[in-house]
Image (cartoon, rainbow, N blue to C red):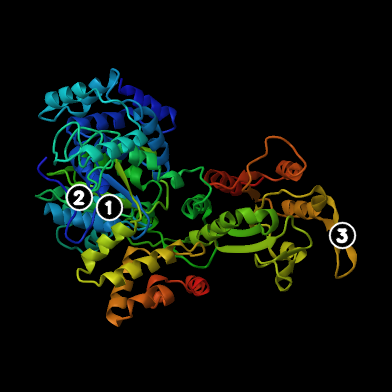
Amino acid sequence: MNEKFSGSQEYVASQELMTTVNIAIALQKPLLIKGEPGTGKTMLAKAVSDALGKDLITWNIKSTTKAQDGLYVYDVVQRLYDSQFGGHGVDDISHYIQMGKLGEAFQSEEQVILLIDEIDKADLEFPNDLLWELDQMEFYIPETKETVKAKHRPIVIITSNAEKELPDAFLRRCIFHYIDFPDAAGMEEILRVHFPDLDQKLLDQALKAFYYVRQMPALEKKPSTSELIDWVRALQASGVPAQQITKTIPFAGVLLKKDKDLDVLKKNL
Amino acid sequence: MFIGFFFLLRKRGIHVSLNEWMSLLEGLEKGLHQSSLTGFYYLCRAVLVHDEADFDKFDQAFLEFFKDVEFTGELPEEFMNWLNHPAEDVESVRKDLEKLELPAETIEEILALIEDRLKTQHEEHDGGNKWIGTHGYTAMGNAGWHPHGVRVGGQSMYRTAQSVAGDRKYRDFRKDNTLDTRSFQQAFRTLRALSVQTDTSERELDLDGTIRDTCDNAGNLKIRMRPPRKNTIKVLMLMDSGGSMDYYARLSSMLFQAAVKSGNFKELHTYYFHNCVYDEVWSQPTLRPNDRVPTDWLLNNFGEEYRVILVGDAMMDPYELHGKRYDWRSRSFSENTGYDQLLRILKKYPHCVWLNPEPKPAHSGYWNQTYLELDNVFPMYHLSQEGIEQAMKSLMRRR
């Protein structure tokens, strides 16, 4: 194995995560990443692509996304209109076939990283519809009688927020990893990557306050890593003295996005 | 020998299929376990387990299987063969380890040994097999590997598998665990399946239908519209507050949060009662007099399309359920007993479940008399993820 993932400059990966990524690459199976929001699931794909020097193709899944959209889209309506108004090339169906993200990844001349982001947003059957394509890395276009086969097996990374259960048959084909919410030490490392010259005292206090806020039981939405990073940026810019942070928790609006949660914080201070 | 682990996992409720097992073997063939038991642990987990809810079961099974199988007995040789398949110096490593005849020390013993040996150790030591050093094979030192090893200072390179598995830090994700909003939320999502096409004036383009119609229409565009799918679930939650429920306050509040957060309901109304639903309920869990709402009002204002979820331990003195309440304000007895009120709710709402944080009592006693009685009339489920899932499923169909 000549290609190994070992984190990147902007992304701090745990030993565990790196091992799992490398397992998935070596076994040529899709890597399924689950975890709390803000643990860097989507960022992982970017980091892997940077670390291995490969292009990243992102397929963002929405509730309306169909498996077919990822393969190719046959623009029937356009063809109909063209035929009605006598456009050119109506006979050639391949004019109206456009590759989806998966098709794009298959057709790429070099191996790419394919990120299927938030797969759980889609319909329950969605993952099942992709089984064959992800397994065999090919699909068939009946309209043009063509088979699109992956030139280089893409490295597939799939993220899920666990909104829906994923089907068993799909899960069996994936390598699975659950990203834990980082502990204080891990979080410090992450902050250090973003703020190399941050005052240690400020960092300690900010982390302390952050984990204090997180453990409050009545919160509706717990702050996550990205909110912490924004918050530290705000603290740094404003020059609030470090010892003030844990006492008053300034700019709490950056950490907590809901009015209710802010009220909870006020009561707890 | 090794296949035993496969069967143990299946026995412990992790449904490993043969395909996954083959993937694991392929991974071992490729050396993905990095010749360490810890690497092996991560490899197994990544390939065989697909849900963080199963991590804990896996940890336990792993411990059960690999806890005592050290470098004694007949397994290790085979096992080491397995693990070191691709390593260059398989033979030497294995011979070294066999020569050592490492006993299966327990952590405590090792700790004691360390102290002892630290006292006697004077020179620096690397790669040996007796003293504490780096990259050695004894149970102590840094960056060495022995399944029961203890690290002395330095950065942890590999946490030994047993200490990782032994942490059981995925315990919270077990499906039968009761304290986790995330899992509650997921359970509530079951109700999502109930979203239906509503009869509103709102219309959206039915693309597939349009294409089909247009084709049928010999290529002349014919647009078809359809009503959008909407979530129409309305939920009325009645929660027991105070008294014997204080113990479960955190659990109840998590359930409440999960219900709010999951955002799957068109409407969610929560009212609180104490012990049992009497003539009045409260709009706040603090049960202050100002927040009182008559139960009649509740029944009149919430139509039968509401799904009702009662949350409470159903444990009370039998008279609290069957006795008529004396109202100190009007100086008279109430008309209905708590039991009557509950039956009224049950009668009015065809979709109604009871979630109980208390597991069903095995033996009947004075305090759980009411539990068993209510269990008979209400579809009662345990307040855990599995229980809620079942409850939600039963909420989907009429009783």
Which residue is label 1 attached to?
A: A116
Name the chain under label 1: A
Decide if residue B389 is on the left or right side of residue B281: left
Which residue is label 3 attached to?
A: B335
- Residue B126 position in % (x across, y down): 13, 38
Q: Label 2, label 3: how many angstroms apart (C-alpha)?
A: 70 Å
Q: Label 3, label 1: how many angstroms apart (C-alpha)?
A: 61 Å
Q: Which of the two discs, 2 and 1, sits closer to the camera?
A: 1
Q: Residues within 10 Å of mark 1 (few under 14, many from 20)?
A: many
Q: Amino acid at mark 1?
A: Ile
Query: Which secondary structure lies at badge 1?
Result: strand
Name the chain under label 2: A
Quadrant for the N terminus of chain B in the image: top left
Q: Is residue A17 above or below residue A225?
A: above
The answer to which image quadrant residue B307 occupies is: bottom right
The residue depicted at 74 percent of the width and 37 percent of the height is B364
- Residue B151 position in % (x across, y down): 26, 42
Q: Is residue B181 above or below residue B133?
A: below
Decide if residue B89 is on the left or right side of residue B163: left
The residue depicted at 24 percent of the width and 50 percent of the height is A71
The residue nearer to you, when weighing B385 against B72, is: B72
Which residue is label 2 attached to?
A: A103
Q: Residues within 10 Å of mark 3 (few under 14, many from 20)?
A: few
The residue nearer to you, when weighing B334 against B36, is: B36
Q: Would residue A84 be visible to someone looking at this image? A: yes
The answer to which image quadrant residue A3 occupies is: top left
Of labels 2 and 1, earlier in sequence is: 2
